[in-house]
Image: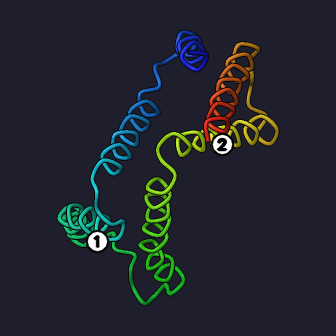
Amino acid sequence: MLVFISIIYLLFNFNSFPWVGLILGLVWSVYNLLRKSIKIDTDIGLLIESLFILPFALIGFYLIVQNNVNDFSFDNPSLMFYLLLAGPMTIIPLFLHVRGVELSGLGPTGMIFYITPTFQFILGFFYYNEPFSIGKLSSFILIWIAVFIYLKDLYENN
């Protein structure tokens, strides 16, 4: 409830509605829920997901070549190397994430996702000198109090 109150408070104090963040969070939550409910091995599941994405990737590659914006050439070996690493650098963390969700469950996994925004906040405030109001601080504190209450209950029940 504390998280919900904090989010509502922040939404009313924004200049614009954060559509991208909310849609991204919703899509990622639905993905995790579907992935958790479908009983299939991690590697087979990622293969099926990749096969669903393959037609879109082929269309994208075709458009890149047709519009002559193909940077994948032997003229620039370092860029070619980075582009070759794009696949493994995408699939390995996704594989580890899906496997972790299978082993630990959605509750503990969801709590981990509070760590990244916290580090982004710390980086923005201390390094990039982002403005930070008392309202944002109080919401931030309420959210982390709720996270600690959840983690305490999770620890006591195990």
- Identify the image's colour scheme: rainbow, by chain, secondary structure or one colour: rainbow
Give the residue displayed 44% in from the left and 80% down from the top. 84
**Vertical arrangement, residue 106 with respect to residue 59, above or below:** above
Q: Residue furthest right?
A: 126
Give the residue displayed 34% in from the left and 46% down from the top. 31
Indicate the quadrant where residue 88 lies.
Answer: bottom left
Viewer-nearest of labels 2 and 1? 2
How far across and how far down the image is residue 145, in percent?
71, 24
Give the residue displayed 70% in from the left and 36% down from the top. 121
How far across and how far down the image is residue 102, in percent?
43, 56
How far across and how far down the image is residue 11, in percent?
53, 15
Q: Check disc 1 and report its element: helix, strand or loop.
A: loop
Q: Check disc 2 and report its element: helix, strand or loop.
A: helix
Three-letter residue code for mark 1:
Asn
Q: Which image quadrant: the C terminus?
A: top right
User: Which label number is shown at residue 79?
Assistant: none
User: Which label number is shown at residue 115?
Assistant: 2
